[in-house]
Image (cartoon, rainbow, N blue to C red):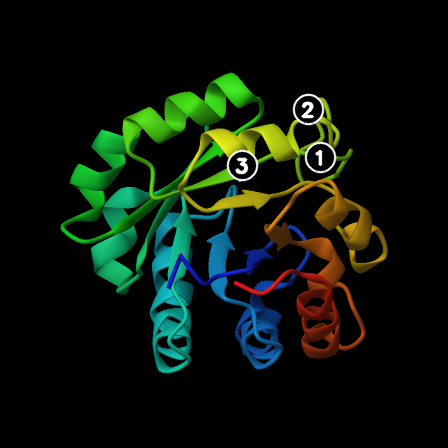
Amino acid sequence: MLATARLYGILDLKYVELEAAVDRTRAMLSGGVDIVQLRAKDFAEDDIVALGLELAPLCRDAQVPFVLNDYPHLVSKVGASGVHVGQDDVSVAQARAEAGPGAIVGKSSHSISQALAARDEGADYLGFGPLFSTPTKPDYTPIGLADIATVHELIEQPIFCIGGIKRDNLAGIVAAGARRVCVVSGILLAPDPAAYARACLDLLPSA
């Protein structure tokens, strides 16, 4: 599924009320999002487990991987497909050990050197960014578009560009060499999240 995935959606509870999370996930799936990640910073693990147990079956029915941001030890508990870790989190090896056999492990990278290190750690896919300034990651310096083509030349694993990506700037990101992207607030805050996701997919190259 990773090989053909093009649009990665993050259900970030910074943008979505907990009560609306299931409906927003259904809309994302209806719009054709290829991966769904639950990002629930500052939430209790019990809340993450409860929501994860609702979201995992929806993603499974849609044949879409469901990934937790952090909390590799909760992957098997909620029936998730895998986990995504950042540069300051546990290693890929530790995340894989905690998540269990067959779990997907993705890793964030903010430079070509970090992307190469994540590849060498054995990450199944990489996030690459933030390309632009974004309230999702306010403490990170945007890296721009200049390294997108190079990182794709060096790394075979799927690379999802991330950070400030919207439908309106997506064409330029694709022109810079992106093949896959992660869209967060653009989808979550759209009046019609499903239509917004479909519009993004229309701008991405075929898998």
On residue 118, the disc is none
Disc number lying in front (3 or 1): 3
Along the line of sight, the residue nearer the viewer: 54 or 181: 181
Q: Which residue is mark 3?
A: 152
* Residue in view at x 30 percent, y 59 percent: 81
Amino acid type, label 2:
Asp
Mark 1 surroundings: few (<14), some (14-19) or many (≥20) residues within 10 A: many
* Residue in view at x 64 percent, y 45 percent: 178
Q: Please provide percent x and percent y for residue 125.
A: 41, 43
Disc number lying in front (1 or 2): 1
Q: Is residue 127 above or below residue 25?
A: above
Q: Which residue is mark 2?
A: 139
Q: Please provide percent x and percent y for residue 20.
A: 61, 72
Q: Is residue 39 above or below residue 129?
A: below
> Which numbered disc, 1 or 2, marks the residue that appears first in the sequence?
1
On residue 131, the disc is 1
Residue 90 visible in this rendered orientation of the protein: no
Along the line of sight, the residue nearer the viewer: 46 or 155: 155
Tell me the SS state at disc 3: helix
- Viewed as shown, does residue 152 lie left or right of 131? left
- Viewed as shown, does residue 105 lie left or right of 158? left
Along the line of sight, the residue nearer the viewer: 15 or 58: 58
Mark 3 surroundings: few (<14), some (14-19) or many (≥20) residues within 10 A: some
Label 3 – label 2 distance at C-alpha: 25 Å
Q: Is residue 113 above or below residue 104?
A: above
Q: Please provide percent x and percent y for residue 52.
A: 38, 64
Along the line of sight, the residue nearer the viewer: 5 or 61: 5
Disc number lying in front (3 or 2): 3
Label 1 – label 2 distance at C-alpha: 13 Å
Q: Is residue 163 above or below residue 103?
A: above
* Residue in view at x 75 percent, y 38 percent: 134
* Residue in view at x 74 percent, y 32 percent: 145
